[in-house]
Image (cartoon, coloured by chain):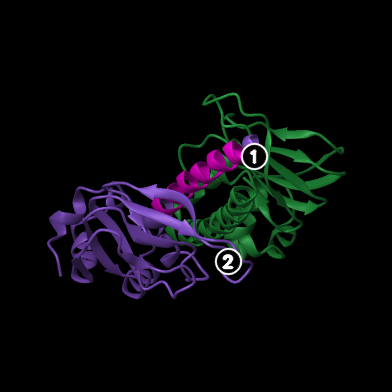
Chain colours: A purple, B green
Amino acid sequence: MISPEQLRRYPFFAGLTADQLRGIAMISDEVSYQAKTLIFREGEEAQYLYVLVKGEVELLYSGGNEGDIADTFVGSIVQGEVFGISTMAGPFHLTASAKSEGLVETIKIEAAGLRAMCEVDHGLGYILMQHLAQALTQRLHEARIQLAAANKKN
Amino acid sequence: MISPEQLRRYPFFAGLTADQLRGIAMISDEVSYQAKTLIFREGEEAQYLYVLVKGEVELLYSGGNEGDIADTFVGSIVQGEVFGISTMAGPFHLTASAKSEGLVETIKIEAAGLRAMCEVDHGLGYILMQHLAQALTQRLHEARIQLAAANKKN
């Protein structure tokens, strides 16, 4: 468990009530990772939603079982952003791997608990899903910029 | 206005009540486009959410004002899918252009009205935002597959 105050500062939790923040804090923990650590692997069941408190995280993509593609850099997460967001949208399997660049500090939130809270409190679910959709839109934008640049080189 | 039954068959509206479907049908219209028509342009204000009823739509991306990138193909929309989804997640500007491949039939939903309905009915907002996040996750997956393939060629 962490203090609700630790969540309040992040845009992902903006607009939540004190009760909602307290609930999420109860299923959250602080976790640190050494540099160059694999935090989670693409294709695994999505068990946690992470908030990046300190450091930088790289997202890597290998196309799952669909080919012989080596890990491709598909974006980086900076301080204050959430990652492991496929934890919140079906089919609940991680769509990329996450690796710490340097030393990384995170808040790790139990995904099943967070999804359950959204089911009983649709106001919470609506806000979090909106923030999730915004984060996904941002990731999509980054992937497309890189794609356009890569196509230009070919 | 269309009939609520026209919405019920699409996965994006799965789980909605008869009242919720009726409300959305009231702000929806059927619109067709000839082949090779620009349905909307990247960067424009997002005014409508579209359901693709028939045909195929290409998504093109040019990086907005960030460079001299030509239109890059970033994915296609097939029958039954929604597009113009940046209409539902901030900052409410279209993140790609959409062009009809052949003749295209769509259902066009007023985005401001749909967002307003979500604000007063959080149960509706929660379901639609979940489906939106799933659609975005799918688009992200497609963009990353293409990115990994493009990087392999370089």
Q: Position of residue A130 (x, y in %)?
A: 42, 51
Label disc, if present, on residue B62 of the rendered structure? none
The residue shown at (15%, 70%) is A1
Whether residue A129 appears in this view of the structure is yes
Taking depth in this image into account, of A55 and A49 the one nearest to the observer is A55
**Vertical order, B30 against A95 (above or below):** above
* A9 displayed left or right of A49: left
**Type of amino acid at the residue the image marks with label 1:** Asn
Give amino acid for label 2. Thr
Position of residue B15 relative to residue B60, above or below, is: below
* Residue B130 place in picture, x, y as percent: 50, 61
Q: Establish whether labels 2 and 1 are both on one chain.
A: no
Of residues A76 and A119, the one drawn nearer to the viewer in this rendering: A76
Specify the subunit that label 2 lies on.
B
Magenta highlight: main SS:
helix
Residue B83 in magenta stretch: no
Q: Which residues are magenta?
A: A131-151
Q: Is residue B75 left or right of residue A58?
A: right
Asked whether residue A149 is drawn in magenta, I would say yes
Q: Secondary structure at mark 1?
A: helix
**Coordinates of residue A9 in the picture (x, y in percent):** 20, 47
Q: Nearer the viewer, residue B117 or B76?
A: B76
- Foreground of the two, B94 or A138: A138
- Secondary element under disc 2, as helix, strand or loop, is loop
User: Which residue lies under the disc numbered 2?
Assistant: B17
Q: CA distance from mark 2 to mark 1?
A: 44 Å
Q: Name the residue: 64% across, 39% down.
A: A151
Residue B10, located in which quarter of the rendered image?
bottom right
Q: Residue at x 56, y 28 (%)?
A: B64
Q: Is residue B96 above or below residue A135?
A: above
**Which of the numbered marks, if any, corresponds to residue A151?**
1
Chain of residue at mark 1: A
